[in-house]
Image (tube, rainbow, N blue to C red):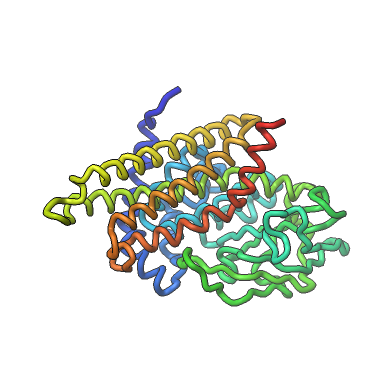
Amino acid sequence: MHFDLTEDQSLIRDMARKFADDRLKPNAAKWDEEKIFPVDVMREAAELGFAGIYTRDDVGGSALSRLDAAIIFEELSRGCVSTAAFLSIHNMCAWMIDTWGSEDQRQRFLPQMMTMEKIASYCLTEPGAGSDAASLRTRAVRDGDHYVMNGSKAFISGAGTSDYYIVMCRTGDDGPKGISTIVVEKDTPGLSFGANEKKMGWNSQPTRVVTFEDCRVPVENRLADEGMGFTLAMNGLNGGRINIGACSLGGASEAFDVAKDYTQTRKQFGRELGQFQVTQFKLADMATDLEAARLMLYRAAASLDAKDPHAAKYCAMAKRFATDECFNVANQALQLHGGYGYLKDYPLERIVRDLRVHQILEGTNEIMRVIIAKHVTG
């Protein structure tokens, strides 16, 4: 059991940190304020291999591990949580095609995804099917060598801009075994998008309803066999939970560093805030929670890399703990700034807004508890 990063992992971490410092952090406030989706900057990230971190290298992927990905997303999120989180979604979509797609599908979709010339969105949630994902109603009916798809998806990151939509839809009976996964391409007739949602955070990526009205999609765009879609979706989310936990960790770590520096310069009652024991204790607890979150995320990532049969439990545990505790750390960092933390002159309020949704997406933290409970109670 080794707790130190390898030399390669340290180099990867430093490269991701430099990109975050140089290209994400200076622009994050503007992207948030003006709701800019920074596709060109994400393509720069793709040049570093961050669009296909754990996609195989024969299609241009980096072929790294889940642990490597957690390290990368933590560092990128120090620059912009929202943009790093979208990169994690794109990576999840690429992994699903790489893992479950045919060789033709891999060669057709992935090379352009690795450069982010083509961008992908993950489409599971519906207006009436959130945590109860297996109750989804978007349906695809076979018609010769096509499916005819009808329905809608809600809260879809990248919708309207993305080129590929990885859609979980019903091709069979009710329940999880009636769900399949189909790649719908942007220019498909009958595919449309709602208005960009007005959100609390994650403003550097668009979020829209995606609607399918008699969309004819080639059968050759289906990933794996009919009825396998729910399995694909849940396996994708295991890794997605690690990634989003790592994004929480990066954002909270940045907030911690900003707060720590602030308490060493801000004076009240004739002393720096950092000289008060109550402040020292608060910083000590925040540092401890960050380290605990990091260890749990690394444990979950290692279990996924090792194909541990208990990986789903570890991923749920890490996601629940990291997103809850890192939100609390960021919120405490804001509190240490007093009224200044509430101003957009500082990054704290944006980080808090961006981290809040991590307790909801990739499976709510209540659903994480359901998954964990099933494992621990048998």
- Asked which quadrant contains residue 190, the reply is bottom right
Residue 341 position (above or below residue 94):
below
- Asked which quadrant contains residue 163, the reply is bottom right
Residue 377 position (above or below residue 273):
above
The image position of residue 129, as x and y in percent, is: 72, 60
Task: Tell me the quarter of the image containing the C terminus.
Answer: top right
* In this picture, residue 307 sits left or right of residue 276: right
Q: Farthest residue in the left direction? A: 270
* In this picture, residue 167 sits left or right of residue 214: left
- Asked which quadrant contains residue 277, the reply is top left
Q: Nearer the viewer, residue 23 or 294?
A: 294
Q: Farthest residue in the bottom direction? A: 195
Q: Nearer the viewer, residue 38 or 152?
A: 152
Query: Which residue sits at x=30%, y=57%?
Result: 22
Asked whether the viewer can see residue 226, the reply is: no
The image position of residue 166, as x and y in percent, is: 66, 58
The image position of residue 309, as x and y in percent, is: 66, 30
Asked whether the viewer can see residue 291, the reply is: yes
Query: Which residue sits at x=31%, y=40%?
Result: 284
